[in-house]
């Protein structure tokens, strides 16, 4: 092997490892965490053999700010989950609608969205969807529009905040964006996209939403307080969440990373709820496989960076961005949306982050590119039932009913919502580029 070939080997090998890992994740035949870990080990192993990537570099590639933020919020959610709070909210909200199908779509979709602004929408959907199905059966109406609203609206709304969507957490950490940056730059676009999604649901499910609910009296007799299994703990955790949310708003002022805010909240929650008890039952609820998956992907993408792949991609994008930054941002968003509809948006986001970082190192103004990525991967997930984990959960729950959501049925409504929200985001970038280019401060 001559020197020229040896120089290309890290590039080629790292690309092969990444593509094969990505492809295996897409097949879903093996759990994504197992594939991610295997890919990370192979990447480091090949890096050591060809001297372009070593264990110390791999460890450095892991973004512990992202991992810490996810871990902290997972612990808080794990404690709140067992109190019955989510079910309480669903029943209370449903009773306010008096069984009207359209009002159920709006109210339960709104509740799921609001919770998803601070807590992850997967947990929210997992706990609210079963209650939704019970209510729909009770009223003898289709649960599909309501379940779809919970997934699509929470997916869309979650893009509004730093902690509302895992890709946002990664993007915020990489770009140095604060909680307030997301509120200022992204939330107005998300609000517009959210209402567009709601209108889309109204049009697509117009037939189902004309159903006349039955047994409304049974719905009104449901006691939401019965869902609360531990009122004391619920109040404590809601108090902790209020503190955490407040700290998110000022974390940049007190020079505290978001991960520290989340971990402070988790530590405080454990201290107040079970100071003398072994926290093992709570920690078992933490999605450790998700955290390991994130760490593995960070290591794999780090290998691409050390092999020069990221730099090469950035060079190509730099030439495009130098021509027209707005065009580059729109292109990134559309590609991100399409990719996120077809595959998991987490590995795609992780692959794009170092590309945009490298563009920044080359002198390109990257703020608008970061926001384009966040909007693209966030809205794109609505397109298919595999576009986000919340979508997968909703489809699985619907299979427990007589009216399951098929891939085609989801695509008919989800793809329309995806296209509509992406059009809103493209318009925002095109009309207000300076708003997205500048800092919040």
Image (spheres, rainbow, N blue to C red):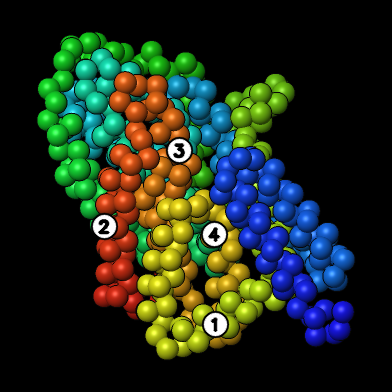
Q: Secondary structure at mark 3?
A: helix
* Above or below 136: residue 370: below
Of marks 1 and 3, which one's residue comes earlier in the chain? 1
Q: Secondary structure at mark 2?
A: helix
Residue 146 found in image quarter? top left
Q: Position of residue 311 (x, y in %)?
A: 64, 78
How far apart are labels 2 and 4 at the CA level?
22 Å
Q: Which residue is mark 3?
A: 392
In the image, is 286 to the left or to the right of 89? right
How far apart are labels 1 and 4 at the CA level?
18 Å
Report if the CB atoms under discs 2 and 4 are less than 8 Å apart: no
In the image, is 386 to the left or to the right of 255? left
Q: Which residue is mark 1?
A: 316
- Looking at the image, which residue sits at the far front? 1
Report if the CB atoms under discs 1 and 3 are less than 8 Å apart: no
Q: Which residue appears at 28% of the width and 63% of the height?
A: 423
Q: Which residue appears at 62% of the width and 49% of the height?
A: 24
Residue 79 found in image quarter? top right
* Above or below 431: residue 198: above
Specify the label residue 348 is tagged with.
Answer: 4
Q: Crowding at label 4, few (<14), some or many (≥20) Cα neighbours within 10 Å?
A: some
Of marks 2 and 1, which one's residue comes earlier in the chain? 1
Q: Which residue is mark 2?
A: 420
Q: Secondary structure at mark 1?
A: helix
């Amino acid at each position: 092997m001559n020197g020229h070939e040896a120089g290309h080997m890290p590039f080629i090998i790292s690309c092969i490892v990444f593509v094969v890992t990505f492809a295996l994740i897409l097949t879903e035949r093996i759990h994504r965490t197992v594939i991610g870990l295997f890919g990370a080990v192979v990447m480091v192993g090949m890096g050591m053999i060809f001297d372009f990537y070593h264990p110390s570099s791999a460890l450095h590639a892991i973004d512990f700010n992202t991992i810490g933020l996810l871990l902290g919020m997972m612990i808080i959610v794990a404690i709140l989950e067992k109190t019955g709070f989510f079910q309480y909210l669903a029943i209370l909200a449903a009773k306010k609608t008096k069984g009207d199908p359209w009002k159920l779509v709006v109210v339960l979709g709104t509740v799921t969205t609001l919770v998803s602004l601070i807590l992850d929408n997967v947990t929210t959907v997992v706990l609210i969807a079963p209650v939704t199905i019970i209510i729909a059966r009770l009223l003898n109406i289709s649960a599909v529009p309501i379940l779809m609203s919970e997934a699509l609206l929470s997916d869309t709304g979650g893009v509004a905040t730093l902690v509302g969507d895992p890709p946002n957490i990664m993007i915020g950490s990489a770009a140095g964006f604060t909680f307030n940056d997301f509120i200022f730059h992204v939330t107005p676009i998300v609000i517009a996209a959210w209402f567009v999604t709601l209108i889309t649901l109204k049009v697509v499910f117009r037939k189902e939403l004309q159903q006349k609910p039955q047994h409304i009296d049974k719905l009104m007799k449901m006691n939401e307080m019965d869902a609360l299994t531990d009122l004391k703990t619920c109040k404590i955790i809601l108090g902790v969440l209020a503190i955490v949310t407040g700290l998110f708003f000022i974390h940049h002022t007190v020079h505290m990373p978001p991960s520290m805010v989340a971990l402070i909240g988790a530590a405080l929650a454990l201290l107040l709820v079970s100071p003398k008890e072994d926290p093992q039952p709570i920690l078992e609820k933490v999605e450790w496989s998700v955290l390991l998956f994130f760490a593995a992907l960070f290591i794999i993408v780090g290998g691409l960076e050390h092999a020069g792949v990221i730099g090469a991609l950035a060079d190509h994008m730099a030439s495009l961005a130098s021509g027209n930054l707005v065009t580059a941002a729109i292109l990134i968003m559309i590609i991100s949306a399409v990719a996120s509809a077809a595959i998991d948006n987490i590995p795609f986001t992780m692959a794009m982050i170092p590309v945009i970082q490298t563009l920044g190192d080359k002198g390109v103004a990257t703020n608008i590119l970061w926001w384009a990525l966040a909007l693209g991967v966030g809205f794109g997930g609505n397109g298919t039932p595999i576009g986000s984990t919340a979508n997968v959960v909703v489809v699985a729950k619907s299979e427990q009913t007589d009216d399951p959501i098929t891939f085609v049925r989801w695509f008919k409504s989800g793809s329309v919502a995806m296209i509509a929200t992406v059009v809103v985001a493209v318009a925002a970038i095109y009309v207000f580029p300076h708003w997205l280019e500048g800092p919040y401060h």
